Amino acid sequence: MSARDNEAIVRETYEAFNARVLDRAAAYAAGDAEWITVAKGETFRGPEGYKRYMQNWTTAFSDASTEITAVHAGEDFPIVEFIGRGTHDGPMRRPGGDIPATGRSLETRFCEVFDMRDGKITGARSYFDLAGMMVQLGLMPALEGAEP
């Protein structure tokens, strides 16, 4: 696939997330795909895993949205930089136990690195500022002189 095709596919997945048509986004996942949330140490597998990854965000932030700020793509990869926004109004799933809703708003920068093969997503690594996110949610004090 061309870089342009790969960019179009990942853009479609973010549009589907924003529209809450998660099955449409998950349809782009290969059966053996792996999504790794680096900051939280989680791995999700296959189309159902990708859907569960997205559902975790929409459960914690029912108004969650993404704004793509940059896409860098090649013949077998796209890298997407985006801003995730939402109000923490539901439980945030994490391996060590759920974090109850705080009612606070959040704006966090993400970078997701995708692997592609034949028009399907075969893997992704999601990087985001977990510490900054915890500060914004009131779950951790800000470092002196640092902006959340």
Image (cartoon, rainbow, N blue to C red):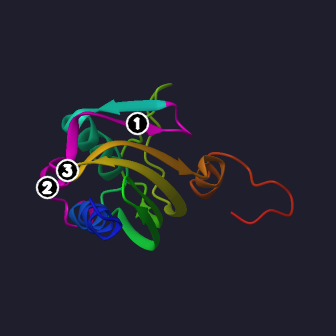
Q: Report the Cα–Cα distance between label 2 and label 3.
A: 7 Å
The three-letter amino acid code for the residue at tag 3 is Tyr
Q: Secondary structure at mark 3?
A: loop
**Residue at x-position 30% and y-position 52%:** 58
Neighbour tally class for label 1: few under 14, some 14-19, many 20 plus, Cα within 10 Å: some
**Residue at x-position 65% and y-position 48%:** 131
Indicate whether residue 28 is drawn in magenta: yes
**Residue at x-position 35% and y-position 62%:** 64
Q: Is residue 97 above or below residue 124?
A: above
Q: Is tag 3's residue or tag 1's residue first in the polypeptide sequence?
A: 3
Q: Which residue is labeled 2 in the image?
A: 24
Q: Report the Cα–Cα distance between label 3 and label 1.
A: 24 Å
Q: Secondary structure at mark 2?
A: helix
Q: Is residue 55 above or below residue 46?
A: below
Q: Which residue is labeled 3 in the image?
A: 28
The magenta segment is 17-41
The three-letter amino acid code for the residue at tag 2 is Arg
Q: Which residue is labeled 1 in the image?
A: 93
The three-letter amino acid code for the residue at tag 1 is Arg
Place of residue 95 in the rendered image (x, y in percent of width and height, measured from the top left): 46, 26
Q: Nearer the viewer, residue 81 or 108?
A: 81
Answer with the quarter of the image where residue 108 lies: bottom right
- In the rendered image, the quadrant that contains the C terminus is bottom right
Q: Secondary structure at mark 1?
A: loop
